[in-house]
Amino acid sequence: MSEQETKELPLWVEDRDKVIANSGTDVEWREQNPPDYTMQKESFARGRKYNHPEGSIEALVQNLVRTFEMEVSHKTNPQQWLSVVADKFKITTNGKQTYNAEDVAREGSYSLFIEPTEHYNPKEETFESSAELFHKAFPEGFLWEVSEVISGPPKVVFKWRHWGNFTGPYRDFQPTGKTIEICGISVANVTEDLKVTTMEHYFDNSAFLNDLTAGCPMHKNGNS
């Protein structure tokens, strides 16, 4: 892709820090202020397996999805999400229930896409409580990258990996320092200007919690 073509790319397929920097003053941030990804960028540089050339289809898809994740996590109003067509957006995991943008903004990605187990019940968590729970377990971030793009727009099929270092407690489970990794494949339909209208994820959504709770719970009050 030429330098001129790169300059004409939509903002939402460029680096998410650029998206944040160009956000207007009317954006409804969950924490009242935009997020700071400094620590996550450092962790990403250490833990990534792929280094996609700037302007490549892999880099563009990665930027788009990372912008989407940022907007879901930090913007309360889906109408302000640049990465999707909010009124048309639908998302599903493993061919199960379909959710719209309002659902994702209200519940968060953890509660909608993780299978219920004895160690996590989505119905008992809020957006805020689930985010706090997993941020404690992965203080350096639970990071995401594209591994391969199989087909380009308008139907984008891509493989990815999600990973984080389990260095904080998860409920009563001691951190192990282990890298928890999930790999999957997604299908995204996008518009001519590269906004997502639908997204389908396919991955083992029970493995994540199985890895977090594989060890023994911490002792409480000095009792075994």
Image: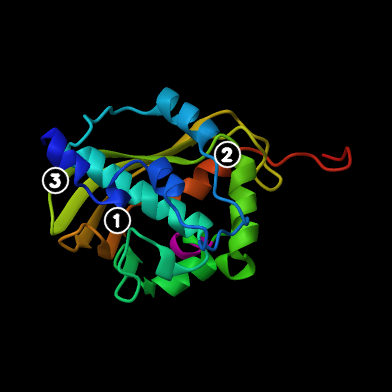
Report whether residue 220 is seen.
yes
Residue at numbered disc 1: 202
Identified at 88% across, 42% down, the residue is 221
Indicate the position of residue 141 as horizontal and vertical percent values. 52, 39
Q: Nearer the viewer, residue 171 or 75?
A: 75
Residue at 46% x, 32% y is 41
Quadrant housing the N terminus = top left
Highlighted magenta segment, given as a residue range: 111-116
Q: Residue at x 61, y 32 (%)?
A: 167
The answer to whether the residues at label 2 and label 3 have Cβ atoms under 8 Å apart is no
Q: Which residue is mark 3?
A: 150
The residue to which callout 2 is attached is 138
Left or right of residue 43, residue 213 in this image: right
Numbered disc 2: secondary structure: loop
Q: Residue furthest bottom?
A: 87
Q: Is residue 179 above or below residue 212?
A: above
Mark 1 Cα-neighbour bin, 10 Å: few <14, some 14–19, many ≥20: some
Callout 2 amino acid: Phe
Q: Secondary structure at mark 3?
A: strand
Whether residue 148 is visible here, answered yes or no, is no
Position of 68 relative to 58 (above/below): below
State left or right for residue 54 relative to residue 108: left
Q: Which of the two discs, 2 and 3, labels the residue nearer the N terminus?
A: 2
What percent of the width, then of the height, locates residue 120? 59, 58
